[in-house]
DNA sequence: CTTTGGATCGTCT
DNA sequence: GACGATCCAAAGG
């Protein structure tokens, strides 16, 4: 491992911050997703703590954009892990995923909510609606708007030290028992409890799951 | 508080 | 030609 990785630092955040290594993302989305809770999403000077994610399991998952094989939109998901898959939602919003799984296996973890930590004024300026901090990025479209992620970021490497967008850990461990429900806004494979959240966090998305709710 | 409908367009059928 | 891995404002109880 590159020693520089463990001494990487996010300016305004207190404490040691290291980049997430690609090997940590090589597993199935369902397994990796809960481990990304409490990690940091860094976009320039904006930092948010990931508090809600969803897993999409590629070829095995009718709800995944990759279910029917590679297309011009979903190509990044079929590449190596650690890259960002960004797509346009409802013609209006952007949504961002962390690609996991090895090349050819189109696993992806949708980033659904972050707790704003730094660069909050920039997030606020990027959002049309002025709300409490917790509402700045508590939904996949809001997250991209607040953090400044758009279609031009599709495919960027989240594990690259010099990248504008990166995934980091600051020593806060993922929750031992993450909350989970079915996924939000999908019409197929509604029953899979693949939405994961930091328990009792005020900043998770307000959206209601598509299927019957399971654990909380 | 909850429910509903409009915006808006790339992607895939 | 239809449909979203959404968000928000407005209307209804």
Image: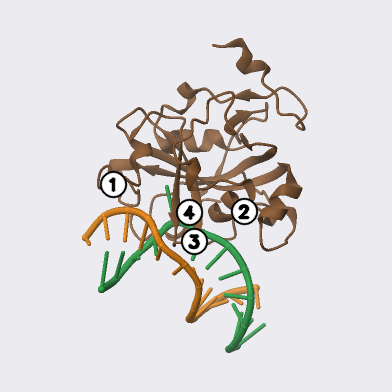
Chain colours: A brown, B orange, C green
Question: How many residues crowd around disc 1 within 10 Å: few (fewer than 14), some, or many (20 or more)?
Answer: some
Front tag of 1 and 4: 1
Residue under label 4:
A214
- Tell which subunit mark 2 falls on: A
**Mark 1 to mark 2 CA distance (whole Å):** 27 Å
User: Is residue A128 found left or right of C5 in the rendered image?
Assistant: right
Sequence-wise, the earlier of marks 4 and 2 is 2
User: What residue is at 68 percent from the left and 16 percent from the top?
Assistant: A7
Quadrant of the rendered image containing residue A103: top left
The kind of secondary structure element at disc 4 is loop
Name the foreground residue: A139 vs A207: A139
Sequence-wise, the earlier of marks 1 and 2 is 1
Front tag of 3 and 1: 3
Quadrant that contains the N terminus of chain A: top right
Sequence-wise, the earlier of marks 3 and 4 is 3
Q: Position of residue A58 (x, y in %)?
A: 32, 42
**Mark 1 to mark 4 CA distance (whole Å):** 24 Å
User: Is residue A100 found left or right of A17 in the rendered image?
Assistant: left
**Mark 3 to mark 4 CA distance (whole Å):** 30 Å
Residue under label 1:
A67
The kind of secondary structure element at disc 1 is loop
Sequence-wise, the earlier of marks 1 and 4 is 1
Residue under label 3:
A92
Quadrant of the rendered image containing residue A198: top right
Q: Position of residue A34 (x, y in %)?
A: 52, 37
Name the foreground residue: A14 vs A190: A14
Sequence-wise, the earlier of marks 3 and 1 is 1
Name the foreground residue: A20 vs A129: A129
Let me know if marks 1 and 4 both belong to one chain: yes
Question: How many residues crowd around disc 3 within 10 Å: few (fewer than 14), some, or many (20 or more)?
Answer: few
Q: Residue A138 carries which label?
A: 2
């Amino acid at each position: 491992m590159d020693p520089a990785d463990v001494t990487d630092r996010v300016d305004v955040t207190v404490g040691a911050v290291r980049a997430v290594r690609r090997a940590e993302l090589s597993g199935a989305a369902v397994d990796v997703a809960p481990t990304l809770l409490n990690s940091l999403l860094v976009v320039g000077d904006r930092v948010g703590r990931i508090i809600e994610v969803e897993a999409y399991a590629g070829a095995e998952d009718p709800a995944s954009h990759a279910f029917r094989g590679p297309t011009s939109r979903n190509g990044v998901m079929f590449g190596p892990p650690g890259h960002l898959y960004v797509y346009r939602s409802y013609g209006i919003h952007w949504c961002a995923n962390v690609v996991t799984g090895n090349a050819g296996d189109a696993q992806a973890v949708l980033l659904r909510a972050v707790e704003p930590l730094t660069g909050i004024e920039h997030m606020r300026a990027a959002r049309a609606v002025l709300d409490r901090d917790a509402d700045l990025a508590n939904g996949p479209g809001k997250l991209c708007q607040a953090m400044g992620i758009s279609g031009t970021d599709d495919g960027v490497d989240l594990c690259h030290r010099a990248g504008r967008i990166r995934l980091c850990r600051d020593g806060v461990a993922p929750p031992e028992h993450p909350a989970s429900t079915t996924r939000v806004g999908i019409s197929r494979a509604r029953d899979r409890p693949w939405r994961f959240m930091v328990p009792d966090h005020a900043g998770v998305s307000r959206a209601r799951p598509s299927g019957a709710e399971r654990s909380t």
